[in-house]
Amino acid sequence: MSNEVRLIGLSGIPEAEPGDDVGALIAQGIEHTGLRLEPHDVIVVTHKLVSKAEGRLVDLASVTPSPFAETIARRYGKDPRHVEVVLQESVRIVRMDRGVLICETRHGFICANAGVDASNVPPGWVSLLPLDPDASAARIRATLLARYGVEHAVIITDSFGRPWRNGIVNVAIGVAGMLPLIDYRGQADTFGNELRVTMMAVADELAAAAELVTGKTRRCPVVLVRGYTYLRGEGYARDLVMPAERDLFR
Amino acid sequence: MSNEVRLIGLSGIPEAEPGDDVGALIAQGIEHTGLRLEPHDVIVVTHKLVSKAEGRLVDLASVTPSPFAETIARRYGKDPRHVEVVLQESVRIVRMDRGVLICETRHGFICANAGVDASNVPPGWVSLLPLDPDASAARIRATLLARYGVEHAVIITDSFGRPWRNGIVNVAIGVAGMLPLIDYRGQADTFGNELRVTMMAVADELAAAAELVTGKTRRCPVVLVRGYTYLRGEGYARDLVMPAERDLFR
């Protein structure tokens, strides 16, 4: 049974407070779960833990909505202060229709509400995406590398909707220590045909896999993936952002 | 370590031939791997195995391209017979630009080349998506249910590209025995906030997770997922297709 990947939810990770070292919180979880970090493990973290530790929370009571935010909020039945935060986190509105705001964030991600989210935060607050999730992932990895001394990768996730399909899925918004894409172009399949256009977004698949364990309402923000052989390298979640000139669905 | 999901690649599954019973091939794999099917296991199958068993292969030598297929093929540097098959598998062209054909299939899926694919098939042939992948999944499940008598779910997958993100990821195109979406609306998060718009496409996340084990060039078309508690029910992959009237990106 060599061909097996394990998705292990870490227990014992406390609520993060601004200023917390996320790598240290994860190490606490690894040890609480009775594990050690092993070579080629992948640590998959929901971004909310990172956002909280980085102080990326906004008290809506502190927000003054602009006239445009007021207009949108009235039209869509939303909180104008929430809309204001969404606009401040956006560099472009991709679609605004039927109560949905699909935004491009400054990272280049395209998602509902620019990643601004009111779930799993105190009532009256919203969370934002980390400012630089690739850098956040690299910091977590540096902490765990110093502590355990083993080669591993870190992925930070959020849940995004997709055109054409119902429901949201976890994707990678921060990556460190691995290549997020596997390029099969030029390799042969089992019939000897050359695979021509296959780039697998494995970091997104690892993110999606982890969500099966973290769920939405359970207090388990980190999954340790064991048994998956990722490609080591200087990879970033920004590699997963399709360049505008290749995007048919801007 | 209760919060764990295992993704186990099945060994010993032979190449499928037209007319093969896919459920029987999978049972062979389960036993070859030294496993038994357990309650709540999820069997995730790459569609190519199903397509081959269902005879959904086309010899390009048998295809006469239409004038339109010839035009497109000349413009994009493609094989006109391959383009002809893509057009025959499509009910709508969503985008046709820069050498890419994004098509709506008769199932409602939107993907490159309507799922017509030349990889992992004999040279000169292409594979098509199963005619009714939900029905294919239900047949596999019926075979395994008869053999093992335990409640389980079956997912059939393909790899689709996504707007805005590089690379392709595995998604569910056929489902049996489980609900492909978990609706968290009305449930409370860990802070007691009501979760408002969260529908997780867990069948797509299971499909993505399985791809970490099946890969593209290894001969491992089936993954057994153990430890994930899906929601039992009459679910279908067609539930994952966003209705046209709600789709902002037609």
Image (tube, coloured by chain):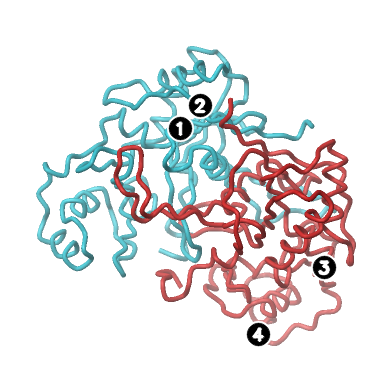
Chain colours: A red, B cyan
Q: Residues within 10 Å of mark 1 (few under 14, many from 20)?
A: many
At label 3, the amino acid type is Glu
Horizontally, residue B148 falls left or right of residue A90, namely left
Question: Rounded to the nearest whole Å, what is the CA distance between mark 2 and mark 3?
Answer: 42 Å
Disc 4 and disc 1 on one polypeptide chain: no
The answer to whether mark 2 and mark 3 are in CB contact below 8 A is: no
* Residue B188 locus on image (x, y percent): 78, 49
Which residue does the numbered mark 1 point to in the structure image? B220
Label 1 to label 3, Cα distance in Å?
A: 42 Å
Which residue is the site of mark 4?
Answer: A68
Estimate how packed mark 4 is, as few (under 14), some (14 to 19) or many (20 or more) residues with alpha carbons within 10 Å: few
Q: Residue at x 35, y 37 (%)?
A: A190
- Compared with A29, A67 (above or below) is below
User: Which label was assigned to residue B10?
Assistant: 2
Q: Chain of mark 2?
A: B
Dot 1 or dot 2, earlier in sequence: 2
Q: Are marks 1 and 2 in contact (CB under 8 Å)?
A: yes
Q: Label 2 sits on what residue type?
A: Leu
Q: Nearer the viewer, residue A49 or A80?
A: A49
Numbered circle sitting on residue A54: 3
Amino acid at pointer 4: Phe
